[in-house]
Amino acid sequence: MSAAVSSQSPAYDDGRTDALPAFRCDSSDPNPDRQAIKMPNVNECQICGAPAPLITGQSDGVAGYRLLRDPWAPKPSFLDGNLHFSCLSESDRNGLFFDEFTRMLRAGHEEIESLDGSLPPLTRMGLGMTEIFSGAECCVFESGVADRWMVVKRNGPWFRLRLDDITELARGADLRSSSDVVPYRLPVDLGSDVRELSLASLLSVLGVADRYEPDVVEYEAVDYYPPKLLLEYVARAPLRLPREAVAFLTEYVQDYTPVSYDDEA
């Protein structure tokens, strides 16, 4: 299996692999709201709190600087970390997430209210995409600066597509994710033998086998760096797009003109 360096995702693209440590303020801190604050572990599912290795179509992440309000946090917070798509699709708050996430996709740079309503407002960096399809099960968004699309299901999960992907869709092919190398920080050291584990075994050791579908994933461990608990792997998974998205994109690509950079200096 050939592997390439992982491309940055539009939603979670700051390249972080380390979880943020628990943070506790000194008892003399004049701001009591800052005391006993536990920072989020971005490598955990922000819904269930369990480890959440990234596998396209089964889990993904949202970076905190996107300033999406976290519908699962007990206090006003911005979402920062990974999500199991199984948890997301089953959550009774996935509609709130869908509204926030798709607003961020459409927006350019926009001012949004801070968590406590204080001034000045915060500036969010959206992706400036255009909604080109809205169906019963999903919406499709298109970039105006690159041949990129996002399919977002109304119950939360999302898929990133390139021109090659929708061209393959039009040919009737079954899509799979790329062979990019994905870094993930494990919660504990599983030893050098972690590279010998199958995906099903790895997920079982992490206690999250029921949140994934490992049997449909082509998995290969690439490297493991014990000091950072950093596991690098390739996981090619099927992209199970909603039928309405497949039908729309199959028709759409017939008349699509790829983005041209000829006029750039």
Image: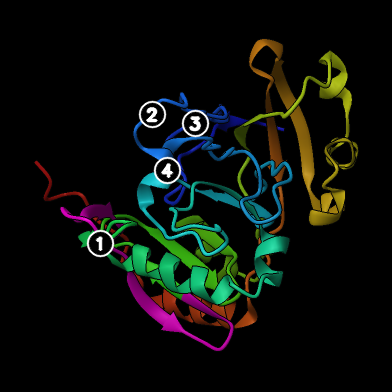
Name the mark on residue 112: 1
Relative side of 119 to 41, left or right: left
Q: What residue type is labelled 1?
A: Ile
Quadrant assignment, res 174: bottom right
Q: Which of marks 2 and 3 is nearer the N terminus?
A: 3
Within 10 Å of the Cα at label 1, are there few (<14), some (14-19), or many (20+) other Cα atoms? some
* Residue denoted by label 3: 16
Within 10 Å of the Cα at label 3, are there few (<14), some (14-19), or many (20+) other Cα atoms? some
Rendering coords of residue 99 (x, y %) = 44, 74
| Quadrant placement of the C terminus | top left
Secondary structure type for disc 3:
loop
Per the image, label 1 sits on a secondary structure element best described as strand
- What is the three-letter code of the residue carrying label 3? Arg
Mark 3 vs mark 4, foreground winner is: 4
Measure how far apart labels 2 and 4 are at the Cα level: 9 Å
Question: Which is nearer the N-term, disc 4 or disc 1?
Answer: 4
Up/down of 135 relative to 159, above or below: below
N-term mark: 2 or 1: 2
Residue situated in front as seen by the camera: 16 or 172: 16
Neighbourhood count class around disc 4 (C-alpha, 10 Å): few under 14, some 14–19, many 20 upward: few
Residue 124 colored in magenta in the image: yes
Tell which residue pokes out farthest to the left in this image: 265
Q: Which of marks 1 and 3 is in front?
A: 1
Quarter of the N terminus within the rendering: top right
Residue at 71 percent of width and 13 percent of height: 226
Q: In this view, does 208 lie above or below 26?
A: below
Gap between marks 3 and 4 measured at Cα: 27 Å
User: What is the spatial separation of the Cα atoms under label 1 and label 3, in whole angstroms?
Assistant: 25 Å
Q: What colouring style does the render use?
A: rainbow
Q: From mark 2 to mark 3, how far is it between C-alphas? A: 29 Å
